[in-house]
Image: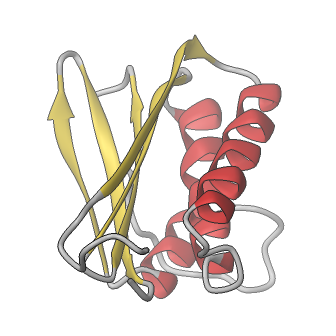
Amino acid sequence: MGSPPSAAHHRELALGETADLEACSRGIAWVRQALTDWGLLAQGQDALLIAAELLSNAVKHAGGIRRLTLTHRDGLLRVAVTDPSPEPPRLRAHRPDSIGGHGVFLVDRLAQRWGTRPNGRGKTVWATLALPR
């Protein structure tokens, strides 16, 4: 028997202030497992890419990853990464021929909405995308 349509699935992964690529790999594997557990992996490939970009941006530009959060409710999946930097990510002009620098552009293209909110001395960057219930 499945969950009622309004039931939320929520998971958090605390990573301290991990600032290495191993933390990114761990976070991506964690997202993949959550999507598998919720029966959403086939529809959640964009979520994996969004999570990878948010995690790697936190490591490269924001001093590390504090927490990764997933919430699935009413057909929407929210991926959120908390880091220690108060500086918000910036969507810059996209240069398809450049090596790297595509993270925020990809998040902007794949997510229905994305944004940032203060979190202590740092921030949480979040992205929401539609997935089936």
Q: Does 40 sit left or right of 67 as displayed?
A: right
Indicate the colouring scheme.
secondary structure
What residue do we see at 73% from left, 86% from top? 96
What residue do we see at 57% from left, 81% from top? 94
Residue lying furthest top in this view? 16
Determine which quarter of the picture holds residue 50. bottom right
What residue do we see at 50% from left, 84% from top? 110
Q: Position of residue 66 (x, y in %)?
A: 46, 21
Count every numbered label the image shows and give the total. Answer: 0
- Please name whichever residue, 7 or 68, is drawn nearer the observer in this view of the structure: 7
Q: Does 72 sit left or right of 74 as displayed?
A: right
Q: Position of residue 114 (x, y in %)?
A: 30, 68
- Please name whichever residue, 122 or 80, is drawn nearer the observer in this view of the structure: 80
Q: Does 48 sit left or right of 130 as displayed?
A: right
Quarter that holds the N terminus = bottom left
- Can residue 11 be seen here? The reply is yes
Determine which quarter of the picture holds residue 40. bottom right
Quarter that holds the C terminus = bottom left
- Can residue 87 be seen here? The reply is no
Q: Residue 127, relative to residue 5: is it above or below?
A: above
What residue do we see at 75% from left, 23% from top? 20
Q: Position of residue 36 (x, y in %)?
A: 68, 63
Q: Position of residue 37 (x, y in %)?
A: 62, 58
Q: Residue 2, relative to residue 112: is it above or below?
A: above
- Please name whichever residue, 18 or 12, is drawn nearer the observer in this view of the structure: 12
Q: Residue 124, relative to residue 76: is it above or below?
A: above
